[in-house]
Amino acid sequence: MNGRVALVTGGGRGIGREAALLLSAAGARVMIASRTVAELAAVGLDYVTADLGTAAGCALAVAETERRLGPVDILVVNHGIGSAHERLVWEQDPDVWRETMRINLDGPFELARLTVGGMCNRGFGRLVFTSSTAGEKAERSGSAYTASKHGVIGLARAVAQDAGPFGVTSNAVLPGWVRTAMAERSARADAERRGVGVEQVWRERAAIYPQNRVLEPREVAQVIAFLCSDAAGGVNGEAITVALGGIW
């Protein structure tokens, strides 16, 4: 990856942070993007602050990457909003639906639209979208999140078809439960609804998997880093589950 330019969204924490650090260690020139300056600054890589749920924010992130590092060769779309605040579909606030789609699906489309053409012209590119096991299996009280993560897989596969003839690959990773800040919020919300402790929620989540544990962010990031590498040139249009052998 020496000299290749990577833009990693949601790069200030969790899976995005770990993916950015792995890409940097492999020789890529990495720009990370999110809305939280303090988290970005603490990573130690180039960063840009942007609202990646808007076309303007996506354009800013891409433009700053190109201005400071060069054309984007690798795009890791990892930012997103979770489902902790969602309700049963008949109780769902339409604004929650629209906000989730804005961040989880519109943003990824804008980022792909702004970068893939250049990758095709140069004859190389890697796109990796972070979906979720909810991208293939629906969760209760999560209509917006589930639909958006299904959509991310479809977007990754559509890009794979459009850009594949030009040496560009596009794939999605589908993590199971990972103990990230977003997942912590959903655990707290679940615990409050049920009147149990947060740690009990995490124990129940761990019990879903054969190893009786949840994922570490780096375990997902390592799959992302592989998909960004030359070694993954034959992998295109795939939705790769990273979930310890469990269904979630």
Image: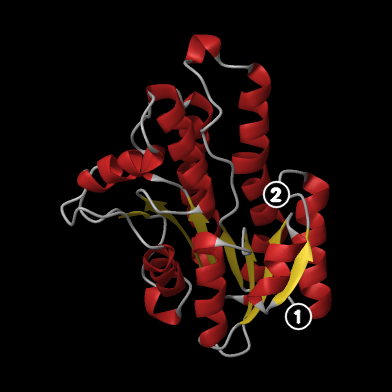
Residue at the (68%, 73%) spot, across then down: 42
Residue farthest along the top direction in this orientation: 90
Residue at the (36%, 48%) spot, across then down: 177
Dot 1: what SS?
Answer: loop
Disc 1 crowd rating (10 Å Cα; few below 14, some 14-19, many 20+) is some
User: Do we see residue 167 in this rendering?
Assistant: no
Q: Looking at the picture, how far across and down is residue 221, in whole percent?
A: 44, 67
Specify the quadrant that holds the C terminus.
top left
Q: Looking at the picture, how far across and down is residue 109, in whole percent?
A: 64, 47
Residue at the (53%, 51%) spot, across then down: 181
Does residue 32 appear left or right of residue 169 in this picture?
right
Q: Within the image, what quadrant is residue 171 found in?
A: bottom left
Residue position marked by numbered label 2 in the rendering:
110
Q: How is the image coloured?
A: secondary structure
Mark 1 or 2, nearer chain start: 1
Callout 2, which amino acid?
Glu
Of residues 34 and 172, the one drawn nearer to the viewer in this rendering: 34
Q: Which mark is residue 69?
A: 1
Q: Within the image, what quadrant is residue 16 found in?
A: bottom right
User: Do we see residue 40 in this rendering?
Assistant: yes
Of residues 110 and 15, the one drawn nearer to the viewer in this rendering: 15
